[in-house]
């Protein structure tokens, strides 16, 4: 049995800000550069909770590649 599981991911196609909560008024945590690979934890409306390296937070789903 494989220990690998299919993970959902997306790639940033324009510079984005990673936020603490799914609102543009929440605390910005990091600036994400174009080409950054993000692993999706969950999505709600126009926001996805993602993780990358040591960061975890929310981004808007505009200007990303790979989101269904």
Image (spheres, grey):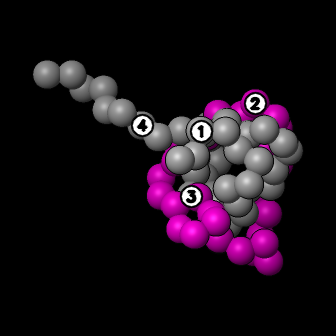
Badge 3 vs badge 4, beta-carbon distance below 8 Å: no
The answer to which of marks 4 and 2 sits earlier in the sequence is 4
Image depth: mark 1 or mark 2 in front:
1
Residue at the left extreme?
A: 1
Q: Secondary structure at mark 2?
A: loop
Q: Residue at x 73, y 40 (%)?
A: 12
What are the residue bounds of the magenta stretch? Answer: 22-48
Q: Quadrant of residue 53?
A: top right
Crowding around mark 3 (Cα neighbors within 10 Å: few <14, some 14 to 19, many 20+) is: many
Q: Residue furthest top?
A: 2
Measured Cα–Cα span from mark 3 to mark 4: 13 Å
Q: Which mark is residue 7?
A: 4
| Residue 30 seen anywhere in this rendered image of the structure | no
Q: Are marks 3 and 2 in contact (CB under 8 Å)?
A: no
Q: Are marks 4 and 2 in contact (CB under 8 Å)?
A: no
Which mark sits nearer the N-terminus, 4 or 1?
Answer: 4
Considering only order in the chain, which callout, 2 or 3, is on the residue closer to the N terminus?
2
Mark drawn on residue 35: 2
Residue that appears at 53% across and 68% down = 44
Query: Disc 1 marks which residue?
Result: 66
Residue 28 position (above or below residue 68): below
Residue 49 - label: 3
């Amino acid at each position: 049995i494989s220990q690998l599981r299919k993970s959902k991911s997306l790639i940033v196609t324009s510079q984005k800000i990673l936020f603490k909560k799914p609102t543009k008024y929440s605390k910005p945590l990091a600036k994400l550069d174009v080409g950054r690979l993000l692993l999706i934890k969950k999505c709600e409306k126009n926001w996805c909770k993602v993780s990358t390296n040591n960061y975890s937070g929310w981004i808007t789903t505009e200007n990303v590649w790979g989101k269904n």
